Image (cartoon, coloured by chain):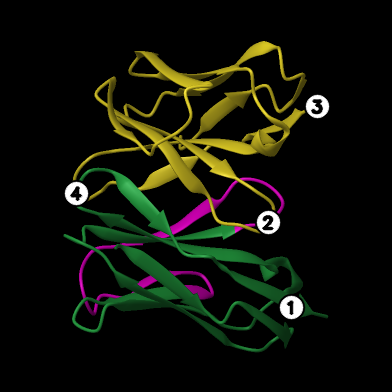
């Protein structure tokens, strides 16, 4: 099973709303990622959690707040977003070590109005 | 600065053709190189390469890494319209789970 699940599939929110994106994997992977992808661009790394601790934050604005409640779950809390934050948000997970294949979830398509 | 460059940026071929996609990289402390296929949704994992000269193969797709010249190629033989997608290359740098993506190659296979 190489499945990473994400909810919701689509989200429309206003600039004053607070919402959360959720990601789950049951592959025993100890690294989990959030990426942002704009149309016709490659995924852009936002955050990496390793063993439930934030190990990489790619200078992401504080209106994006990640959370890793346990080794299977990853959340991204959204608050006061801007229209330019509209994008596909991808979650991924990987093993560590030489077999560290990274698998993506289906993504949440976010529109900020 | 770490970077990953893919070429060509786009490619149009006919069914049955063979294509070769390129990925070159400059990263600190290379750990692995991954190839993905992306259609309209999330990237689908194809291959992970860590060692030079060892070909990975899956059906009509194959890939190889050259760690001396710092590049990888992805070959697709006997292309089909279902191969139309963006092919992404990502390199893990610095051994800290940081994957750097290239801009991708957009492949279109015509019937």
Determine contact: label 2, label 3, CB under 8 Å.
no
The label nearer to you, 1 versus 4, is 4
Q: Chain of mark 1?
A: B
The label nearer to you, 4 versus 3, is 3
Mark 1 or mark 2: name the one nearer the start of the chain.
2
Question: Could you give the CA–CA distance between mark 1 and mark 2, rounded to whole angstroms?
Answer: 13 Å
- Which image quadrant for residue B10? bottom right
Determine which residue is flagged by label 3: A113
Left or right of residue B11, residue B22 in this image? left
Residue name at image x 21 percent, y 57 percent: B31
Q: Colour of chain A?
A: yellow
Determine contact: label 4, label 3, CB under 8 Å.
no
Please tell me whether mark 3 sits on a helix, a strand or a loop.
Answer: loop
Question: Could you give the CA–CA distance between mark 1 and mark 4, rounded to whole angstroms?
Answer: 36 Å
Please tell me whether mark 2 sits on a helix, a strand or a loop.
Answer: loop
Determine which residue is flagged by label 2: B39
Task: Check the image and report above or below for A25 versus B76.
Answer: above
Q: Residues within 10 Å of mark 3 (few under 14, many from 20)?
A: some
Please tell me whether mark 1 sits on a helix, a strand or a loop.
Answer: strand
Question: Could you give the CA–CA distance between mark 1 and mark 3, rounded to whole angstroms?
Answer: 36 Å
- Residue A22 in the image: state x and y as whole percent: 55, 19
Determine which residue is flagged by label 4: B95
- Determine if marks 2 and 3 fall on one subunit: no
Start-end of magenta stretch: B38-61
Q: Chain of mark 4?
A: B
């Amino acid at each position: 099973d190489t499945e990473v699940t994400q909810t919701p599939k689509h989200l429309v929110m206003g600039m004053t709303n607070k919402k959360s994106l959720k990601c789950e994997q049951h592959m025993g992977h100890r690294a989990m990622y959030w990426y942002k992808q704009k149309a016709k661009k490659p995924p852009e790394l936002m955050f990496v959690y390793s063993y439930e601790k934030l190990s990489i934050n790619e200078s992401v604005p504080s209106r994006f707040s990640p959370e890793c409640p346990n080794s299977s779950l990853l959340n991204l809390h959204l608050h006061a977003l801007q229209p330019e934050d509209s994008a596909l948000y991808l979650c991924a997970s990987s093993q560590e070590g030489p077999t560290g294949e990274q698998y993506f979830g289906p993504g949440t398509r976010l529109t900020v109005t | 600065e770490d970077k990953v460059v893919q070429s060509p940026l786009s490619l149009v071929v006919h069914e049955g053709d063979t294509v070769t996609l390129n990925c070159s990289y400059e990263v600190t402390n290379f750990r692995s190189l991954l190839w993905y296929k992306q259609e309209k949704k999330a990237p689908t994992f194809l291959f992970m390469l860590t060692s030079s000269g060892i070909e990975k193969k899956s059906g009509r797709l194959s890939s190889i890494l050259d760690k001396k010249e710092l590049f990888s190629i992805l070959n697709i033989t006997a292309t089909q319209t279902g191969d139309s997608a963006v092919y992404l290359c990502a390199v893990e740098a610095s051994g800290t789970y940081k994957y750097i993506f290239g801009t991708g190659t957009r492949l279109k296979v015509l019937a």
